[in-house]
Amino acid sequence: MAAVVAALLAGGVGGGVGAWLVDDNDKPASAGVNSSSPPVDPASLNRSPTSVAGIAKQAVPSTVTIKTKGGSGAQGTATGTGAGFVYDKQGHILTNNHVVSLAADGGELTVTFSDGTTLPGKIVGRAEGYDLAVVKVDNMPANVQPLPLGDTEKVAVGDPVVAIGAPFGLDSTVTTGIVSAKDRPVASGDQNQVSYMNAIQTDASINPGNSGGPLLNAGGEVIGINSAIRSVPNSGGQSPFGAQQQESGSIGLGFAIPINQAKWVADTLIQGGKPVYAQMGILPDSRYTGTGAQIVAQSPNGQDPVTAGGPAAKAGLKPGDVITKLNDRAIGSYEDLFSEIWSHRPGDKVKVTYQRDGKQATTEVTLGQRVGDN
């Protein structure tokens, strides 16, 4: 399976976009009401707790809009908008790393709740490789509750989903769709910062500003963190708000980080402030064009292709081996390999299928760990 290299907007579907669209003092006018229309019987509307309206009523107050401003230097004037949701009663908010990265080095970060309450936020920890971050606010509104978390393992293709965020700066926007695919290997970002995930794919409308917002199931539980979209170049033209359209939007291919992985990463960041990654101890060859992920035969910079004494070395893997499966998951490229490894935790045992000199073999690797993003 070839990895989907998501074409991100401003580093994702979050930071750096939406500021031109609408601000706190300039909300789009609501449509007028036709006085000749007959009244609607409330009893005829399905607004049960498990309806979209019911889910939105419960989840919107716990979904926030995050605005960032860069610190000194080249990013000093840059701004960004994204989303997040209340993770616990201590005021921790889970979001994407690319939503908060502008504010990481002396910048500013604010968190706005659906009732308009705006509070300064502090970054607790960031995980660039997972594209996740935890922000904390003090004196969180008393009526705001953490969103319940679901179980990624119970998600099925075709399940209905609800996405909430701030697309193009329009806070508390609710969209719906289905789970289009599971375990979709996605590499997103740019040359300076790349993240990998075995994503939940959805056709729910996700646009710039939705990053970090929750993807909920029909029970109102968070099953994913909206993080990336596949988009096409925009041909220009006018936006409905009178500005020149610069960003391309949803084409029905959105990707969310599974909540089971996000929860573990969030708890790790809250406890220690640094991310922890599972690792195999190999150097994959990004130039390899065949099927699978090849360990470089000889590193051009002197780095060992297989770390001496590392997990892969202990399992008998060698430079030049081509990894084609991890457990039962087919590996089509090195992006697939990273996505699959990072969906596991350090200490997990994985069955590795590989090819060497035209022959197939298997071995078991106990994954090691790396702390931090450096």
Image (tube, rainbow, N blue to C red):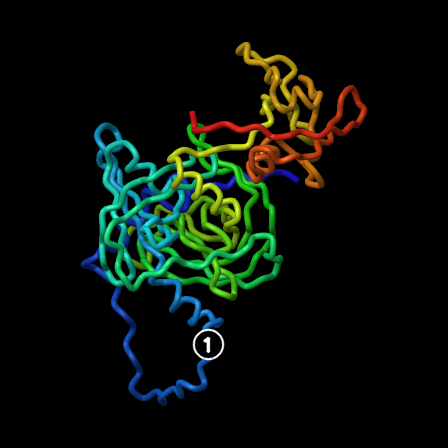
- Indicate the secondary structure of the residue bearing disc 1: loop
Q: Is residue 231 visible?
A: no
Residue at screen point 45% across, 50% down = 226
- Coordinates of residue 69 in the picture (x, y in percent): 25, 40
Q: In the figure, residue 140 lies in which quadrant? A: bottom left
Quadrant housing the N terminus? top right
- Coordinates of residue 92 in the picture (x, y in percent): 34, 48
Image height of 303 relative to 191, above or below: above
Quadrant housing the C terminus? top left
Q: Nearer the viewer, residue 206 or 337?
A: 337
Q: Nearer the viewer, residue 276 or 52?
A: 276
Q: Residue furthest right?
A: 359
**The disc labelled 1 sits on which kind of residue?**
Ser
Q: Is residue 161 left or right of residue 110?
A: right
According to the image, label 1 marks what residue? 48
- Coordinates of residue 195 in the picture (x, y in percent): 48, 36
Residue at screen point 37% across, 43% down = 134
Q: Is residue 168 left or right of residue 205?
A: left
Residue at screen point 28% across, 53% down = 21
Image height of 305 relative to 280, above or below: above
Residue at screen point 46% across, 28% down = 371
- Coordinates of residue 233 in the picture (x, y in percent): 45, 44
Q: In the figure, residue 299 lies in which quadrant? A: top right
Q: Nearer the viewer, residue 270 or 177?
A: 270
Q: Residue furthest top?
A: 302
Q: Is residue 186 visible?
A: yes
Q: Is residue 78 left or right of residue 153?
A: left
Q: Crowding near pointer 1: few (<14 within 10 Å), some, many (20+)?
A: few
Q: Is residue 222 left or right of residue 87?
A: right
